[in-house]
Amino acid sequence: MKYFLLSSICLLLISCGSTVAVDYEKNTDWEQYKTYQFYREMNSNLNELDEKRVVKAIDSTLKIKGFQRTDYNTYWVAFFVEETLSNSRNTIGVGLGTGGRGVSVGGGIGIPIGGKVINQKMTIEVREGQPNGKLVWQAVYDGELKEKAKPKQKEAYYNKIIPMMLKDFPPEK
């Protein structure tokens, strides 16, 4: 019973994590090209500081994978974000109850802790040939960032999620 409870808790914790969904064009020859550039006109819905953090994280991840950022490129990379603000899902539960003689009554509430969070859905797109060329690869990440995150926290957040998003880029044959 103890092991069942422990494994159930572990499974619950694992299933509550952030997710990355990847899709790509199967007929693309990924071995042929190793150069890229970012869209010149990109509407990422991020402020300039966060945009720079994301560009830096993508650059460093693609460099490790053997890609080079050039003006004579094969792939165009874009990213954009959809954000919503909500209360933190972390709560403290408070409950009360009574029981006796076969009758029981109970109640409880969850009090949010940790302030508000930004629910962020980030998409990275890779297009072939030119900015409006054929979409050949895409990753979508759903996660949370504290509303009042400090610059170092934001940098750490993007340095964590971008490699996760680009983990399967380029796809293996």
Image (spheres, rainbow, N blue to C red):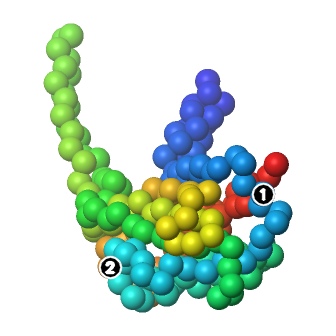
In the image, is residue 79 above or below residue 17? Answer: below
Residue shown at the point (61%, 80%) measured from the top left: 37
Image quadrant where residue 62 sits: bottom right
Residues under labels 2 and 1: Cα distance? 43 Å
Viewer-nearest of discs 2 and 1: 1
Q: Earlier in the sequence, mark 2 or mark 1?
A: 1
In percent of width and height, residue 98 lies at: 18, 27
In percent of width and height, residue 59 lies at: 65, 81
Q: Callout 2: 10 Å neighbours few (<14), some, many (20+)?
A: few
Question: As rendered, which of 40 and 19 lies closer to the eye?
Answer: 40
Identify the residue under disc 2. 148
Q: Label for residue 29?
A: 1
In the image, is residue 107 above or below residue 123? Answer: above
Residue shown at the point (63%, 65%) measured from the top left: 128
Query: Left of 84 or right of it: where is 132?
Result: right
In the image, is residue 83 above or below residue 155? Answer: above
> SS class of the residue under badge 2?
loop
Q: Label for residue 85?
A: none
Query: Left of 55 or right of it: where is 41?
Result: left
Q: What amino acid is labelled 1 in the image?
A: Asp
> SS class of the residue under badge 1?
loop
Image quadrant where residue 56 sits: bottom right
Q: What amino acid is labelled 2 in the image?
A: Lys
In percent of width and height, residue 76 lies at: 59, 73
Image quadrant where residue 171 sits: bottom right
Name the image quarter holding the N terminus: top right
In percent of width and height, residue 149 lies at: 38, 79
- Taking the image as drawn, is residue 53 in sight? yes
- Taking the image as drawn, is residue 60 in sight? no
Residue shown at the point (80%, 76%) measured from the top left: 66
